[in-house]
Amino acid sequence: MRTRTLGSTGPTVSSLGLGAMGMTDGAYGPSDRDESLATVRAALDSGVTLIDTGDFYGMGDNELLLADALRGRDRADYRLSVKFGMLRGPGHEALGFDARPAAVKNFLAYTLRRLGTDHVDIYRPARLDPTVPIEDTVGAIAELVEAGFVRHVGLSELNADTIRRAAAVTPISDLQIEYSLISRAVEAEVLPTLRELGIGLTAYGVLSRGLISGHWDAGVARTGDFRAFSPRFAQGNVEHNLALVEALRAVAEEKGCTVAQLAIAWVAAQGPDVVPLVGARTRNRLAEALPALDLELTPQDLARIEAAVPVGSARGDRYPSAFMAGLGVGN
């Protein structure tokens, strides 16, 4: 397994990370606990060392699942990235965000208990709390670093100006943000800012929630699935977007790989400071993703990929309009 270092101050991790949200959250339909456990263990056995979760994924169930999957493993063999701050009611309804310093420390106390560990490797607010200065939030995480409960301060879904303000307070290991062939808004200001400041990027949504995986069928019903109300999956948009996937498939077939592998490899090729996260929920999907690390994309390959899926060619926002306002950048 190849490795990459997150920024100038972050940890060294596998070149591909595992995102665990879909294993319990229900956002992408039902999941199988036994298969999820097996997938996490298979990822570790394959050399994946970066595992990403959130304390609000499955109302804490995601962390409990990871605790089971990681039990008996040497703590030095993996890195845990944890997001916090999302508030939910007993009916799973969204209640806003809380990134006050006291809340930051409270959230971490519960996370450590659920995960069964004495520290997390990267701790990050999932979104910006509009009522709390980012300086206060990352300052609280920095205090947790000093106390030994956190190793590195991370960020998520912030714009360039807010990243600069956070980095002026404490070293930042990485920004987690959506980045894929059809979600490239980070390239305008965010990615150059990260590189200027020596901050890495962990990219989620590299397959755009399955849309550009090569496996999505527009006619499949997805009751209770996030994609049922995602603009990019909406009727009229999804057909256009899947046509882009078919253009990408032609390139993938010439490279002798799957569409998903090509899409993951494209993200990894954007720089040694970029680490793709794959939300594989099964061992089969994990097994498909891993060979993407061995794909060598030439300048000609990259040109063909971007001709197949030009910047801005996707239809629909990456989130419903109610959620877009809370993002640092758009599509």
Image (cartoon, rainbow, N blue to C red):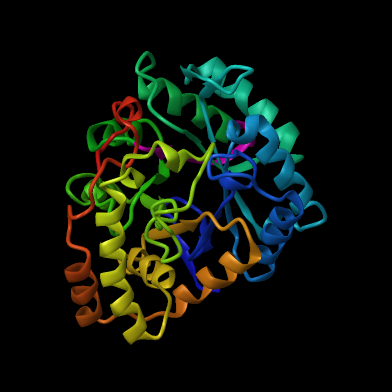
**Does residue 118 show up?**
no
Q: Main secondary structure of the magenta part?
A: strand
Q: Nearer the viewer, residue 250 or 18?
A: 250
Residue pictured at 47% horizontal, 39% vertical: 226
Q: Residue furthest right?
A: 72
Q: Quadrant of the C terminus?
A: top left
Q: Is residue 92 above or below residue 217?
A: above
Q: Locate residue 255: give its quadrant.
A: bottom left
Q: Is residue 151 magenta?
A: yes
Name the spot of residue 322 as percent of width and height, x first: 33, 25
- The answer to if 322 sits in the magenta stretch is no
Residue 237 in view:
yes
Residue at the spot 75% in from the left edge and 45% down from the top edge:
67
Q: Nearer the viewer, residue 24 or 97?
A: 24
Residue 283 picture location, percent across and down: 65, 65
* Residue at 39% in and 71% down: 259
Q: Measuring 68% from the left and 39% from the top, which residue is drawn there?
A: 63
Judge from the rendering whether residue 99 lies leftward or rightward of residue 188; answer left or right: right
* Numbered range of the magenta stretch: 147-157
